[in-house]
Image (tube, helix red, strand yellow):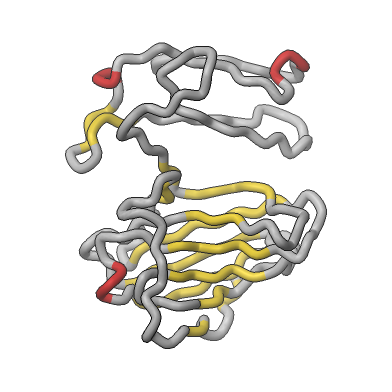
């Protein structure tokens, strides 16, 4: 444990930043592929406010100055969809070279719009979208041109107010795939000439 803090219901931190650190890079856990990794755990202790948070990895305690070569990832994402239908959200799961299939699970989507998956070789795959307080699963095969790169998940809402949703993606071994803030290999752009694919029948859970 490098640092910890309980914020509680303190208006000082509403729409304000709090800085942890500074930390030396070597204080992180060394990962052979991507270097030193720091883990941030945020736990809600009580209440039902639906608090939302932003994180920024900075070289300054007072300004958001990006760290060259820095990146962030998570395995499961809970976030609030835009209420404006023209505002789309994205996540970028990384596909390892030995991944062959994915299982996408989304929870409590309130049937709010669409989830589409694209890549350099996949024009469009539409995932099943869950209703209120239920989860659904979509499974699809990884294409050869997607291995070692990132997928682009696009969330296209209808405009449900304060819609908090959860999404995760697993590979064929049941391992959760990492969503990177800066997608590995860059944001994938479809190369025209490949037909779009549709999701299989819905699997309710």
Q: Position of residue 195 (x, y in %)?
A: 43, 87
Image quadrant containing the N terminus: top left
Considering every residue shown, the one lying at the far left of the view is 32
Q: Position of residue 42 (x, y in %)?
A: 55, 30
Q: Nearer the viewer, residue 155 or 40?
A: 155
- Residue at horizontal 78 percent and vertical 49 percent from the top: 162
- Residue at horizontal 30 percent and vertical 34 percent from the top: 69
112 relative to 184 in the view: left or right: right
Q: Nearer the viewer, residue 165 or 135?
A: 165
- Residue at horizontal 77 percent and vertical 37 percent from the top: 48
Q: Position of residue 32 (x, y in %)?
A: 17, 39
Image quadrant containing the C terminus: bottom right
Total numbered labels placed on residues in the image: 0
160 relative to 76 in the view: left or right: right
Considering every residue shown, the one lying at the far right of the view is 161
Q: Is residue 26 above or below residue 37?
A: above
Q: Is residue 88 above or below residue 4?
A: below
């Amino acid at each position: 444990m490098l640092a910890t803090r309980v914020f509680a219901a303190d208006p000082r931190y509403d729409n304000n930043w709090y800085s942890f650190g500074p930390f030396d890079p070597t204080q992180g856990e060394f990962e052979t592929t991507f270097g030193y990794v720091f883990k941030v755990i945020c736990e809600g202790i009580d209440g039902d406010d639906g608090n939302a948070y932003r994180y920024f990895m900075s070289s300054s305690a007072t300004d958001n100055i990006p760290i060259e070569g820095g990146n962030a990832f998570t395995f499961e994402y809970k976030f609030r969809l835009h209420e404006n239908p023209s505002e789309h959200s994205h996540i970028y799961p990384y596909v390892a070279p030995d991944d062959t299939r994915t299982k996408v699970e989304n929870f409590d989507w309130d049937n709010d719009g669409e989830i589409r998956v694209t890549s350099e070789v996949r024009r469009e795959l539409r995932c099943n979208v869950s209703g209120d307080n239920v989860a659904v699963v979509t499974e699809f095969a990884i294409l050869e041109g997607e291995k070692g790169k990132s997928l682009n998940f696009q969330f296209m809402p209808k405009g449900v107010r304060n819609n908090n949703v959860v999404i995760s993606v697993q590979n064929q071994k049941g391992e959760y795939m990492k969503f990177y803030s800066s997608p590995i290999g860059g944001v994938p752009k479809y190369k025209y000439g490949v037909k779009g694919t549709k999701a299989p029948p819905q699997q309710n859970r």
